[in-house]
Image (cartoon, helix red, strand yellow):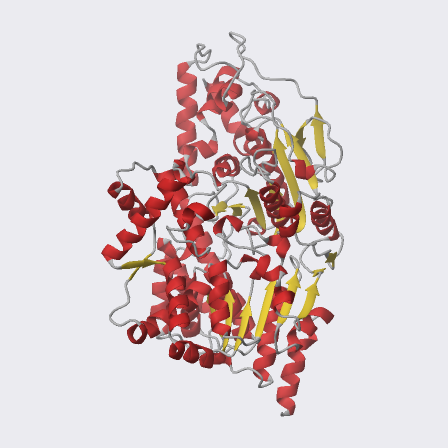
């Protein structure tokens, strides 16, 4: 081994802690890495792979690293490339199986591989029509999930009835009807010569089991295996992994049973928990040093898991002893707890607090609002838009599908053919994208122009990041190739704007500031979590949410759904023992320090005309029922609407972002004569008062 090689190996190990170094230098399996949230598991296993490659123990093409999402696989591939181990095969289970199936199908089965059914909805709808069953979209979606669960659990239509006991009625159908639909779905695929993603795994398993020559060739190709997020492996994926291994023990698995949150898809932490039983000689390494979060966040996460009580033998068997994380970051602010009167007030409070963080220097892209169900996002979208804060909805339009991104990649591809020598990559990318609207300074406002700029800015930032990581030889052609790889894996760069995402979608991500919202019973835990096992999974999901935060954590809930509604909600049981006190209050947020102001709950708002309880946010804003007559001058209201339209066009934003109709109505009826009076109108916050207050008062004086 040359001195240069030794130096490189030492550099690979020098930045690792004691436990990470043990992982990186244990080059032969079986090895099980129990890695808590934020403990650097990806760093440990990528350095292990790179160390093995550079020391000659691993041949890059003969090691298969498997993870669960295309994005995670792309991230691992990128890190390995930076470490000089770019030839390692890094794929999802499905991608690895599909590649093998495409290669071996002609010799193992013969003919052409059937087409791949990317979405089940149409096939399920056709199966339902054959059975003369009527299904709506929601039912089709539920049934698609049920069939996926059945197939990854290696359940067939004939064994479904027995296996599905206690699973309820997906799509509103009884188990017998689901079993019949399952068979009809399989028949539809057969008639159309199609296979779905689960079939890719099933058929690959079948070929490896039945064809010794194919199995031998696969095992000759891959000598070493690494499986990330091992707690999420399904029985079908585990069976495929066993066939790849063929009795060998060159396996490294990495996981955390406390982050098992996909049981409804067939994932089970049993394979991780029983690894030592299957491999008695396995080395077990625990990573517990949390490099992501402050001690305050880590303490809250540890206490949440420690508060779990026995749910009976069945639940206790599936609950692993949590890893006790030890924070490595400096101390930060204490987590904030906010109780609000209703969902609208909660969204407004969160938007105000985010505005304070942004004003204090936190980038919007480093902030996330996480909720239990996607349906909760609308209130926070509107509150952020009203506050003039940009956001991105995770699970919305994919980054590389955006028109401006497609145009940018096309322009960069053209530029790659004639990039002048000596121009840094970052500057070259800026020069190309300037023709599409990129500038160093962000445009004002939060409309389509700002969204386009944020997409282009993300590409510029990525060019700077990759150029710094890979050196001067990384030019425009390499950057374009990287973009194509990321597009195929949907590995999007960070975009400016607060992230709105479900707790499930947040897995694997992290932000400086995290807002966990809607933390009331019925949402966290979700109402249909009605057994100790499912409640435990909800606790783990909440734990995942907490551990996404690096520095700042804000937890909130509301007492009623609508303004003025009955305050029948109560905080999530998971907050018991975590939040300071349990006084029933509503909370506002004031000042830059983040201190909370508590005020007595005064009961439901009533109409100033008839005295009835106001049911909607719009009614509460104007202070009267929708059926009661307005008291504003029509000309004044129309003048306000005309002014709002001019402001919206100038800022390139929807009109409601300036003021909603309900707020305009309230202004017209209140006829405020000063900024102080205008500030008392519902819907006029501090930011809008500063931005539009004088103009509104001048218009009212003119009227």
**Rendering quarter of residue 137:** top left
| Residue 639 in view of the camera | yes
Number of marks drawn: 0
The structure residue drawn at horizontal position 57% and vertical position 33%, both measured from the top left corner, is 522
Q: Nearer the viewer, residue 269 or 60?
A: 269
**Rendering quarter of residue 438:** bottom left
Q: Name the outermost residue toward the bottom.
A: 2
Q: Is residue 375 left or right of residue 213?
A: right
The structure residue drawn at horizontal position 50% and vertical position 44%, both measured from the top left corner, is 390
**Which quadrant would the N terminus be assigned to in this image?**
bottom right
Q: Nearer the viewer, residue 497 or 107?
A: 107
**Which quadrant would the C terminus be assigned to in this image?**
top left
List x then y, in percent, for residue 286.
70, 64
Q: Is residue 108 above or below residue 175?
A: below
List x then y, in percent, for residue 187.
27, 52
Q: Nearer the viewer, residue 21 or 202?
A: 202
**Rendering quarter of residue 556:** top right
Q: Is residue 597 above or below residue 426?
A: above
List x then y, in percent, for residue 355.
60, 41
Q: Nearer the viewer, residue 613 or 483?
A: 613
The structure residue drawn at horizontal position 48% and vertical position 75%, both measured from the top left corner, is 474
Q: Is residue 500 left or right of residue 15?
A: left
| Residue 439 in view of the camera | no
List x then y, in percent, for residue 39.
67, 61
């Amino acid at each position: 081994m040359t001195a240069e090689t030794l130096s490189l190996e030492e550099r690979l190990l020098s930045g690792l802690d004691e436990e990470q170094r043990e992982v990186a230098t244990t080059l032969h399996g079986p090895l099980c890495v129990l890695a808590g949230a934020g403990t650097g598991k990806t760093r440990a296993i990528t350095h292990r792979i790179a160390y093995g490659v550079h020391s000659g123990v691993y041949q890059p093409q003969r090691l298969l690293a498997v993870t669960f999402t295309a994005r995670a696989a792309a991230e691992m591939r990128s890190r390995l490339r930076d470490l000089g181990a770019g030839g390692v095969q890094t794929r999802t289970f499905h991608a690895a199986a599909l590649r093998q199936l495409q290669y071996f199908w002609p010799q193992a089965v013969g003919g052409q591989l059937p087409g791949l059914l990317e979405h089940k909805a149409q096939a399920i709808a056709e199966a339902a029509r054959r059975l003369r069953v009527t299904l709506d979209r929601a039912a089709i979606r539920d049934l698609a999930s049920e069939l996926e669960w059945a197939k990854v659990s290696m359940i067939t239509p004939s064994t479904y009835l027995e296996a599905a006991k206690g699973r309820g009625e997906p799509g509103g159908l009884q188990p017998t009807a689901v079993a019949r639909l399952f068979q009809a779905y399989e028949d539809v695929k057969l008639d159309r010569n199609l296979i779905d993603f689960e079939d890719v795994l099933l058929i690959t398993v079948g070929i490896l089991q039945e064809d010794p020559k194919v199995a031998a060739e696969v095992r000759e190709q891959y000598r070493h295996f690494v499986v990330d997020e091992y707690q999420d492996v399904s029985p079908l994926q585990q069976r495929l992994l066993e066939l790849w291994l063929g009795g060998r023990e060159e396996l490294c698995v990495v996981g955390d049973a406390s982050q098992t949150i996909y049981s409804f898809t067939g994932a089970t932490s049993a394979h991780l928990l029983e690894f030592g039983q299957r491999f008695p000689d396995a080395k077990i390494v625990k990573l517990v040093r949390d490099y992501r979060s402050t001690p305050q966040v880590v303490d809250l996460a540890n206490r949440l898991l420690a508060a779990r009580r026995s749910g009976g033998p069945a639940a206790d068997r599936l609950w692993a002893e949590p890893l006790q994380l030890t924070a490595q970051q400096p101390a930060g602010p204490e987590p904030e707890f906010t109780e609000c009167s209703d969902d609208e007030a909660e969204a407004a409070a969160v938007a105000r607090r985010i505005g304070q963080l942004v004003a204090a220097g936190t980038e919007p892209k480093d902030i996330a609002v996480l909720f239990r169900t996607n349906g909760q996002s609308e209130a926070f979208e509107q509150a952020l838009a009203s506050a003039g804060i940009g956001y991105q909805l995770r699970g919305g339009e994919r980054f590389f599908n955006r028109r401006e991104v497609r145009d940018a990649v096309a322009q960069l591809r053209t530029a790659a053919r004639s990039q002048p020598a000596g121009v840094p990559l970052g500057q070259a990318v800026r020069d190309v994208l300037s023709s599409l609207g990129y500038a160093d300074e962000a445009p004002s406002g939060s409309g389509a122009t700002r969204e386009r700029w944020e997409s282009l800015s993300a590409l510029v930032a990525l060019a700077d990041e990759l150029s710094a990581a890979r050196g001067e030889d990384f030019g425009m052609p390499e950057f374009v190739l990287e973009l194509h790889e990321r597009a195929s894996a949907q590995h999007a760069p960070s975009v400016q704007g607060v992230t709105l995402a479900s707790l499930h979608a947040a897995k694997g991500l992290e932000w400086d500031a995290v807002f966990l919202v809607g933390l009331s019973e019925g949402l966290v835990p979700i109402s249909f979590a009605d057994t100790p096992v499912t409640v435990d999974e909800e606790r783990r999901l909440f734990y995942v949410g907490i551990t996404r935060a690096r520095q700042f954590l804000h937890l909130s809930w509301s007492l009623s759904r609508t303004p003025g509604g009955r305050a029948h909600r109560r905080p999530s049981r998971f907050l018991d023992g975590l939040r300071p006190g349990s006084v029933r209050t509503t909370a506002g947020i004031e000042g830059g320090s983040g201190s909370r102001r508590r005020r007595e709950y005064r009961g439901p708002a009533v109409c100033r005309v008839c005295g009835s309880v106001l049911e909607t946010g719009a009614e509460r804003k104007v202070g009267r029922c929708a059926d009661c007559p307005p008291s504003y001058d029509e000309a004044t209201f129309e003048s306000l609407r005309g002014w709002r339209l001019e402001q919206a066009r100038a800022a390139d934003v929807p009109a409601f972002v300036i003021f909603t109709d309900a707020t305009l109505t309230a202004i017209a009826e209140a006829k405020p004569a000063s900024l102080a009076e205008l500030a008392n109108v519902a819907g006029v916050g501090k930011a809008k008062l500063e931005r539009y207050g004088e103009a509104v008062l001048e218009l009212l004086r003119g009227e």
